[in-house]
Image (cartoon, rainbow, N blue to C red):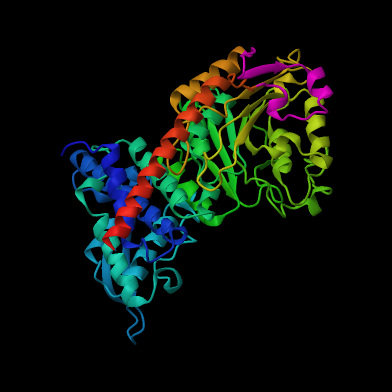
Amino acid sequence: MTKIDQREINNAAWAACDTFRGVVDPAQYKDYILVMLFLKYISDVWQDHCAEYRQQYGDDETRIKRKLARERFVLPDITLTDQSGKSSQPVILDEFPATFYSLHERRSASNIGELINIVLDNIEENNKSKLEGVFRNIDFNSEANLGKTKDRNRRLKQLLEDFHKPQLNMKPSLVSEDVIGNTYIYLIERFASDSGKKAGEFFTPLKVTELVAKLAAPKPGDRICDPACGSGGLLIQAAKEVGDRNFALFGQESNGSTWALCRMNMFLHSFDSARIEWCDTLNSPLLIEKDRLMKFNCVVANPPFSLDKWGAENAESDQYNRFWRGVPPKSKGDWAFISHMVETALEKAGRIAVVVPHGVLFRSAAEGRIRRKMIEENLLDAVIGLPGNLFPTTNIPVAILVFDRSREKGGSRETSKDVLFIDASRDFIANKNQNTLSDEHLTTIMECYRKRSDIDKYAHLATFKEIKDNDFNLNIPRYVDTFEEEAEIDIAAVQQEIDTLEKELAQVRKQMAAHLESLKGEG
């Protein structure tokens, strides 16, 4: 069979959404589509590897399955029984392997939703170390989400048929793991822009994740963390920046459904060992070692903007003392996330890159005091302003803050006292619904960041004194002057144009009057 390219799989997977589109809200059906894609992929991998190992081991199924389990995962055999009778021996109703293809064969069953749930439960139970809890929030037999039995069965049958198409054959011999992982990210992105406000909580545009990952600059051997990891796109991008497989990934996500997507996303990208916790980072951090916060070489995040009710009431008594610089206001959790990220970065070495709304740069009161302390500690390395309308859920412009703990006393960069300001807000590709960044835009930003020098109307290297004189306000226009003088107006030319237009208008009026007179005559 011929190789299948990225676009074919993307289009086929998106077309499968037509089964639900317009009937079920995207925020609900996205999970069903993504879980079915995941099940189809692991079933194709299982079949492909089974065929390969049969050539080595013949019909020794036990040996084949042991080898598959050691390498990646297990798709177990399922036996459905009826124990309601008087006989001590249960009656076997059906036997089948826990694969997509078994479900496709049974797609017309009256209990197809229940059968899909059984398959997922068995896969999770037999792969606890990699997939435990991943399917706990998904119910293919849900009347609330998928409708009454008749409608639900019809949709699920159609969904199984949609994913059975040749374009969605995802055997490793036909597609790379990257292609499947990229399809997953593609679908998540499409759902984010297709389903309104809620979906954007778990998606950061690809070019923004690339930029954040490049600014964090992870190296081989690093521990990389995203404390608000969503579906994992930023962690995956940071992993790609390393250049080899010598790294460890960690994340935490508060939304159970999104946490499950992240776990599946890690699996699809062969980052099975990534540790992704499900809980609220600010109130219940779970990435702990010996009763202390784990420390990381790189910490990256696009946390929820200005999160309300983030837990300020508990911050004063935080057992990890993350908010010793001050407690952010209860209605805006931006500096709470930043404080957590700084405290989890390695002392004198860790790097932090975080996406923030512009209010973080200049709001006063508690936020201003925290900002001042971090600048006085010499932690802030760069402030980078990006264009507006980059995200599917908001059109506000955002910024990226880069902190570097190697600038602390005793660190390798302790003599660096300046902060680089970059105004990249005018560099974007304008699209109908959403702006994007290009590779060239990212290259320009990164070259400027590495050179750390002034560029007229684009970048300025500010001293500590400049920032202090600005009362520690980081609003980018205070440091990067992008003002463009308007060209002088040629009064004589403008007057001549007005005279010409007035003559043309008089002529039009004259013609209109004559036309009206002729109409009266006809009447």
Outermost residue toward the front?
A: 521
Q: Position of residue 7 (x, y in %)?
A: 29, 39
Q: Position of residue 201 (x, y in %)?
A: 55, 49
User: Does 436 appear above or below 416?
Assistant: below
Instruction: Name which residue lies at 70% across and 53% down.
Output: 308
**Residue 29: which quarter of the image?**
bottom left
Pick the front one: 296 or 291: 296
Magenta stretch bounds: 452-481
The quarter of the rendered structure image containing the C terminus is bottom left
Q: Is residue 473 magenta?
A: yes
**Residue 300: which quarter of the image?**
top right
The quarter of the rendered structure image containing the N terminus is top left
Pick the front one: 144 or 89: 144
Q: Position of residue 469 (x, y in %)?
A: 83, 22
Relative side of 173 to 221, left or right: left
Instruction: Name which residue lies at 80% across and 54% down.
Output: 313
Q: Position of residue 419 (x, y in %)?
A: 71, 20
Q: Does residue 299 show up?
A: yes
Instruction: Name which residue lies at 40% across and 65% down.
Output: 24
**So how many labels did they put on this image?**
0
Relative side of 291 to 459, left or right: right
Pick the front one: 400 or 125: 400
**Residue 424: which quarter of the image?**
top right
Instruction: Name which residue lies at 68% across and 31% down.
Output: 345
User: Does 43 appear above or below 376?
Assistant: below
